[in-house]
Amino acid sequence: MLLRTDNIWKSFGERDVLQDISIQINAGERVGLIGANGAGKSTLLKILTGEYLPDQGIVQTAKQLEIGYLAQNTGFFSEKTIWDELLDIFAPVRQLEAQMRQLEQQMGQTKTLENETKYQKILERYAELQSLFEEKGGYRYEARMRGALTGLGLGKINWQETSISQLSGGQKTRVLLAKLLLTEPGLLILDEPTNYLDIEAVTWLEQMLLQYSGAILLVSHDRYFLDRLVNIVYELENHQATRYVGNYSKYVELKKEAEEQQRKQAAAQAKEIQKLEEFVERNIARASTSKRAESRRKTLEKIERIEAPSAQQAPAAIRFETAVTSGRQVLQVNNLTIGYEKPLVNSLSFQIERGEHIALLGGNGLGKSTLLKTIAGEIPALSLDAMRLGTNVELDYYEQEHRDLNLDKQVIDELWDAHPNLDQTSIRNYLGQFLFRGDEVFQKVEKLSGGEKARLSLAKRLLNKANFLLMDEPTNHLDLASKEQLEEALEDFPGTILFVSHDRYFIHRIATRIWELTPEGIQDYRGDYEWYLEQKALEKESSQDSSSKESTLTQAEQWRQNEKATKRKQKQHQQKVEQLESEISELEKQIQQIQEELCLPEVYEDSKKSLMYQQNLQELEQTRDAKTEEWMHLLEASP
């Protein structure tokens, strides 16, 4: 046991944050601490590190346990340079190095023939120090420093001349993280370590932590990061901690099972309680049965009630549909240069086909968001030969800053003004799917949190029913449950998606094709995220060009990709068929209703009303015929 808490309680004023928290971390464990924003994760970490004292309970640690802690807001300040700050970690090793240099000078000054005994003693002492120096990593500490700084994305900074005080908040956090990794404490506690890191730096950190010899306690919203690293998950929910054995995906599975079991137990107990209450009510007043009724009432009082999982915590129920099916070719671009005053990337040429879910990856500042904005028409191209949308392509753009939202409007009006044909009940139902309930729909948009604005913008996308979605960081600000729901919806989306994201778990679930944006253009990987990682590994190991790398993949791997793509197309095709069948059926009902109303005297005797009904009937029949023709075409073209 490295660390254990027993019955920790913590409140701030009248607000309870933690209640009866008991957790344990053992040597070598990788522990993930998860929970909704405000659940108390950072508070618990500060109690474990001694920054806060608990109101009740104790924290026990193993003797001589060294704890390294990276907080979200580090408050890190130093006038030293980056290099000198990290050199302090290796002060004992550097002292050994200084002693070795002194002995080297003494050996040079001592004439062997005149004082062989003294020379031999110096040589023996030097050998001892050299062995200790090597044991403590003295020959590689500078290489480790360079590796940590470069791996965490600080490679372009002059470490010897730049002071910590000159760095941004994110850069300071990365220096402190490098310092902790180089210190190698027995327990490493990290609060959102992937903040401020791009995918390349996160991947480097992930590899470092996989090889880390000590134990790790990790708070992160990066589910792919958690999946790769942790083998224990503690969830903070309703002020309490629940332990799950496994990584993040296993936690999701185990929690669903536990909630289902709890739901069944609560339902069974409710039935039993109802029977007891009915028995008491019927028999308490009868002299012959009052003792038994009183006994049952005492039993009722002693029952510890099982609560079903709260319906209030249910995540947003999201399903994206398309109004029409686009042609096979969705977008064709020739010789596009993107940027603002200066070009970011020149001469981009590519095409996108229906049903593709493309993840656009690349380092910060290379132009990923700029490319989306250019395609969406938000900013002009610096130069362009051609950009053509395909037949029936309807484009919709989800912007991470949510500038499409009117801050002065109420939530309900933001949605209703965009879709005035819907009634208030329908609008509120849609908002309810995105967790806007009751009076929350009358909030001003400007008062919403980042997560609430994200959900409102997603609600607009859902109602727009476009078949080509451009999405810039769609999971930013969403809680874990809403991310899961968004992923399920987009995974089944029958249209086309081009998206930018740093969320590797999201990319892993959604992407069927990867584009990596570089200053030279787009590197195209026609496969999912795992395929992309395999290809990147091959590129790193070999100097062959991309075409020869593809030839090294096994036939089984190629088949796996083709099979996955085929299944996805079949699923999307079937969904569209079923959607059309439902729409045709609804149109038939409307047509039949109008035909019946045309036979009513108050209709056919009123020429204006009769004409209006007939025009409506004609429009419905034309729509039905068009959808029926599309339905028949889909059946004939079944993949």
Image (cartoon, helix red, strand yellow):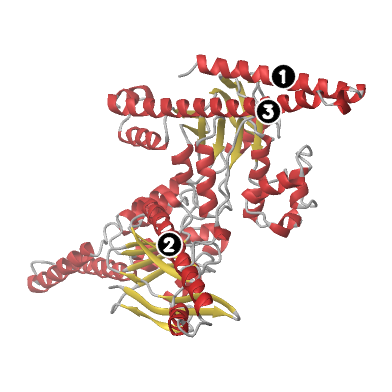
Cα distance, mark 1 to mark 2? 50 Å
Front-most of 359 and 106?
Answer: 359
Q: Identify the residue at image location x=37%, y=72%.
A: 23
Cα distance, mark 3 to mark 1? 11 Å
The location of residue 69, given as percent across then percent down, is 42, 68
Q: Secondary structure at mark 3?
A: helix
The location of residue 223, given as percent across then percent down, is 44, 51
Up the image or down, 623 lies above or below 514; here it is: above
Up the image or down, 486 lies above or below 87; here it is: above
Q: Amino acid at mark 1?
A: Glu
Cα distance, mark 2 to mark 3? 42 Å
The location of residue 369, given as percent across then percent down, is 61, 39
Which corner quadrant holds the C terminus? top left
Tag 2 and tag 3, C-beta contact below 8 Å: no
Q: Amino acid at mark 2?
A: Gln
Between label 3 and label 1, give the one nearer the viewer.
3
Find disc 1 in the rendering and name its residue. 621
Q: Secondary structure at mark 1?
A: helix
Few, some or many residues within 10 Å of mark 3 (<14, 14–19, 20+)? few
Find disc 3 in the rendering and name its residue. 589
Closer to the chain start, of discs 2 and 3, is 2
Q: Is residue 627 left or right of residue 11?
A: right
Front-most of 185 and 46?
Answer: 46
Q: Quadrant of residue 600?
A: top right
User: Can the viewer see residue 196 in this picture?
Assistant: no
Between label 2 and label 3, give the one nearer the viewer.
3
User: Can the viewer see residue 39 in this picture?
Assistant: yes
Closer to the chain start, of discs 3 and 1, is 3
Front-most of 360 and 337?
Answer: 360
Q: Amino acid at mark 3?
A: Lys
Find disc 2 in the rendering and name its residue. 262
